[in-house]
Amino acid sequence: MTSELTVTPVTIRTGALISDVRLSGDLDEATVTAIRAALLRHKVVFFRGQHHLDEDSQVAFARRLGELTLGHPTQLPLEGQPHILNVDAAEGGRAAYWHTDVTFTDRPPAFSLLRAVLVPPVGGDTLWANTAAAYADLPPDLQATADTGRAVHTNDFDYGRIPVRAIDQLPEAFRERARQFVSTGYETEHPLVRIHPETGERALLLGGFARRVSGLDADRSAALIAALQAEITKPENTVRWAWAAGDVAIWDNRATQHYAVNDYGDAARIMRRATVAGDVPVGLDGRGSRPIRGDATAYSPAA
C-alpha cells in the first residue's frame, strides 16, 4: 500500500530505490501515482526482488503508466509478446553507448521498464544520466546555443558503431539483429532542448542516435554534440545499477540517457523491456519534432 512505499535516493540527482512494493497490474491507484511521482522526481527508479513478474504481468503493470508502444520500431518482439523487446546479449543486445530510447522516431517512449531475467555473475551494470540536471548546469552561452538548436537523429548508424569488428564478421545472431535494426530507416529532427510535458523542466535531447545539428557544418555539429554530451554524462548527473535477477528499472525516457556496460564477456545477460508511448517533443520555441524519413505511427500511438 502507499503508506508502506519507501523511496530511498541512490544519488542526490539521479535514481531511487523503491521498496515494499510488489509490482502488478492490480496495484491500487494511489501506489501507482506515488511510483510515478518518484519516477518524475528521480528520473529512474529501481525495484528489487520482482521474481513473480513474467511478460504478461510486466505488460499489465506497464499499462498502468500509459498506453504501450510495440516492442521496437524495427526489431522483432519476443514471440507472442508484441509489447516486449527481448534484450539478449547472446543475440547482440549490448547497447554500450549513451542513448535515449528510440529518438530516431518523432515520438520516443515516455517511460521504459526493464526487467532482469538472467544476469552475469560479474559486470553488466547499467548507467543513467539526468538530462534535466545537465541542462540546468550548462554554462549560459552553451545553454543559449542549445535553446535554439535542433538535431537529426537516425537509426542508420547503430551497428556501424561496434568498434571491434565489421558486421559481416559478427556471429549470425548479431548480424540478424543488425539487419533488423536498420530494416526501416528513420530520421527525425528534434529540438536540442525539450520541455518535459509533466514537470515543465527543460531537458537536453541527444544521445547516440543524434548524428548532426541542423544548420551547422560537420565539425561544428560534432563539437556541439560532444560538448553537450560531456555535460550530460558528468559523474554528478549519473547513477550506476548493479543488476540482480528479478530487478526492475523504470526510467523517464524524456529526461535521461542510459548506457549498458559491456564488460561481461560471453556470460549470459537477458533483459525484457516494455515502453510506454510518449508525445512529440516540443522545444522552447513551441515547435515540435519533425519526422524526415520513416513512419512510426504503427510503433507508437499518440500519447
Image (tube, rainbow, N blue to C red):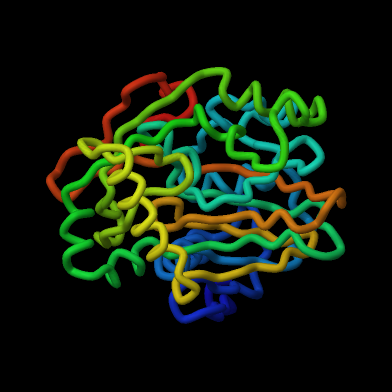
> Depth check: 52 or 109 in front?
109
Where does residue 245 sit, x and y in percent of width and height? Answer: 80, 60
> Would residue 277 be seen by someone viewing this image from the given angle?
no
Where does residue 300 sit, x and y in percent of width and height? Answer: 45, 30
Q: Is residue 109 above or below residue 236?
A: above
> Depth check: 15 or 91 in front?
91
Q: Is residue 147 above or below residue 135?
A: above
Q: Quadrant of the N terminus?
A: bottom right
Where does residue 293 sit, x and y in percent of width and height? Answer: 37, 20
Q: Residue at x 65, y 37 (%)?
A: 84
Q: Is residue 301 above or below residue 141?
A: above
Quarter occupied by residue 250? bottom right
> Depth check: 236 or 211 in front?
211
Q: Residue at x 56, y 47 (%)?
A: 62
Quarter occupied by residue 137? bottom left
Q: Is residue 100 above or below residue 23?
A: above
Q: Residue at x 52, y 79 (%)?
A: 11
> Depth check: 115 or 20 in front?
115
- Taking 273 as reference, is 275 left or right? left
> Would residue 9 be seen by someone viewing this image from the given angle?
yes
Q: Quadrant of the C terminus?
A: top left
- Taking 95 as reference, is 139 left or right? left
Where does residue 236 sit, x and y in percent of width and height? Answer: 46, 76
Q: Residue at x 49, y 59 (%)?
A: 29
- Disc count in the image? 0
Quarter occupied by residue 116? bottom right
Task: Report the residue that reaches farthest toward the front.
Answer: 219
- Taking 122 as reference, is 282 left or right? left
